[in-house]
Amino acid sequence: MSNELTIPTLSFLPTVTAPLAAACAAMEALPEIADTPTCEEAVKVNAMLGKAIKGVEKARVTWTAPLLAAQKAAIAAEKEATAQATEYSKILAAAISEYQDHLRIERAKAAAQAFAQEQALREQEAASGEEVRSTPPLVATTMVEDAPKIPTRKVARLVVTDETKIPRLYFKLDEKLLLEDLKAGLEISGAEIGYEDVLVRR
């Protein structure tokens, strides 16, 4: 019988390649069905084909089942790893925020102490009529920037309202430190926070 089918090479299923090829070859060798013997032979070949096809299906399941199981395990592992990484990220974010809050508090305390010292010096100068100079305490200058992810945002800008009232701590005037202390809630004579809208690139 004529056959126009092309049997692919099942290199990944070697146990079923030979039976399938043999069944197809037997079909190609069949004569035209013209009598009982040729019909019986065709029935046998058809049975061979059916058996070979079932063998391919069985082999496919045998080969793909472990792959599907591995894929399922990989997906589960990915979800678990992602969940763990997300939890770690939350813990780190909380720790960073706590540390930044600590820095703000410590800087505000140092600035408050410096301000109190400055006030005491001014009072001493007023009483004695002479300028008293001293080395101001060191103040942490770690900058903590909060950048909200929005199209526009408020940006704190330093506005000096009366430079003569600003404590010596900020001379030569450290605008960044002064602005950070204002943002931390410290009241400083001669300066305040001003806001302006700035464009944010997307």
Image (spheres, helix red, strand yellow):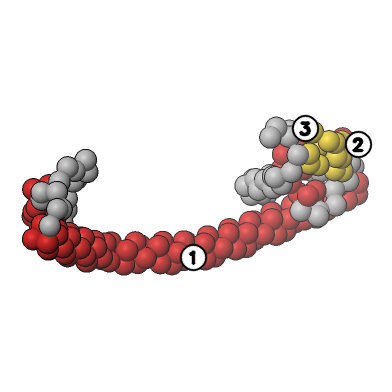
In the image, 151 versus 184, the foreground residue is: 151
Amino acid on which the number 1 mark rests in the picture: Ala
Determine which residue is flagged by label 3. Answer: 199
Q: Residues within 10 Å of mark 2 (few under 14, many from 20)?
A: few
CA–CA distance in space, label 3 to label 1: 36 Å
Label 2 sits on a secondary structure element that is loop
Mark 1–mark 2 distance (CA, rounded to whole Å): 53 Å
Q: How many marks?
A: 3
- Say whether disc 1 or disc 2 marks the residue closer to the N-terminus: 1
At x 83% / y 36%, what residue is drawn?
197
- Residue at numbered disc 1: 83
Contact, mark 1 vs mark 2 (Cβ under 8 Å): no
Residue 162 is labelled as: 2
Image: 129 above or below 36? above
Q: Residue furthest front?
A: 35
Secondary structure beneath dot 3 equals strand
Which is more toward the observer, 194 or 192?
Answer: 194
Q: Is residue 184 left or right of residue 48?
A: right
Of the residues under marks 3 and 1, which one precedes in the sequence? 1
Write the residue at 12% across / 57% down: 35
| Labels 3, 2: front one | 3
Amino acid type indicated by mark 2: Asp
Q: Quadrant of the C terminus?
A: top right
